[in-house]
Amino acid sequence: MDVGVPMTDELWDSYLPKKFQSLSSFQWTPIPVIERTWKYLSLEKEVTSLVDLGSGVGKFCIYLSILANRSINILGLEDREELVDLSLSLKALWNTPEVNFKNINFLDEFPYGHSHYYCFNPLYETMKGSHSIDSTKIKSANQFLKDLEILKRKLYQLNSGTKLITFHGFGGSFLAGFRIVLKEEIACGEFLVWERE
């Protein structure tokens, strides 16, 4: 990116293969949401690390790192190897060495111990719809509800004070053991920050 040129979703998408550009508005976090996340994090007393649950093409992780002057350790978890490979190539392109990506399913291997977590409705792929990344996920209401319960149990085990930042939710509307500390409408969606009590 040229110095002084503002980041936009269109500019970011131009670095993606065509097949992923068309999914941008449904699957990848909008730039204004990443910027709002940084505004929130920049005022936090202690941000030791952040995990993106379902990092896709790495857009949230990489651009957040750039906004933060590469001052936060960021981990993106994605269960599609092709997307992890793409994220790693974009990480190199944007020179964000403190961002890491792992090819794992966070429902199977949840990364405990981080100060902040982020998700952009990571269970969306199990819902029936026309904006799927591919056909590898089982799509059914039962699968969605099963995965939602697993995710809620994992989140409930987080340490007191841990923050969860969501855009378009985490898949549900209530999280036991959490309180909402920030709620805003942004970029045609709901931006929430939850704190583990």
Image (cartoon, grey):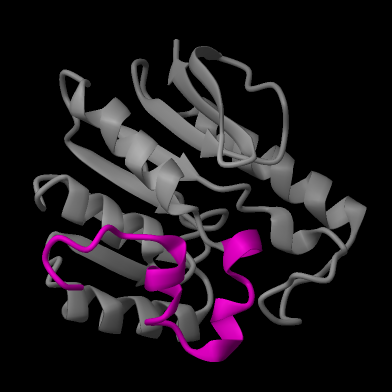
**Image quadrant where residue 84 sits:** bottom left
Q: Nearer the viewer, residue 145 or 15?
A: 15
- x and y percent of residue 69 in the render? 9, 49
Q: Residue at x 57, y 68 (%)?
A: 24
Give percent across and percent down for residue 160. 37, 16
Could you say which quadrant of the image residue 176 lies in? top right
In the picture provided, is 86 more to the left or to the right than 188?
left
Q: Residue at x 13, y 59 (%)?
A: 98
Question: Magenta segment: does it hold 26?
Answer: yes
Range of residues picked out in magenta: 1-27
Horizontally, residue 153 falls left or right of residue 29, namely right
Which residue is depicted at the point 63% across and 22% down? 175
Image position of 156 with respect to 99: above or below: above
Image mark count: 0
Q: Is residue 47 magenta?
A: no
User: Residue at position x 16%, y 72% from top?
Assistant: 2
Q: Position of residue 96 (x, y in %)?
A: 15, 66
Give the quarter of the figure containing the C terminus.
top left
- Nearer the observer, 194 or 64: 64
Q: Is residue 38 above or below residue 123?
A: above
Residue 139 location, x and y as percent?
A: 84, 66
Vertical arrangement, residue 146 with respect to residue 169, above or below: below
Q: Residue 103: tell me if it is visible.
A: no
Q: Is residue 163 visible?
A: yes
In front here: 138 or 153? 138
Q: Quadrant of the N terminus?
A: bottom left
Query: Is 87 above or below relative to 71?
Result: below
- Figure quadrant of residue 118: top left
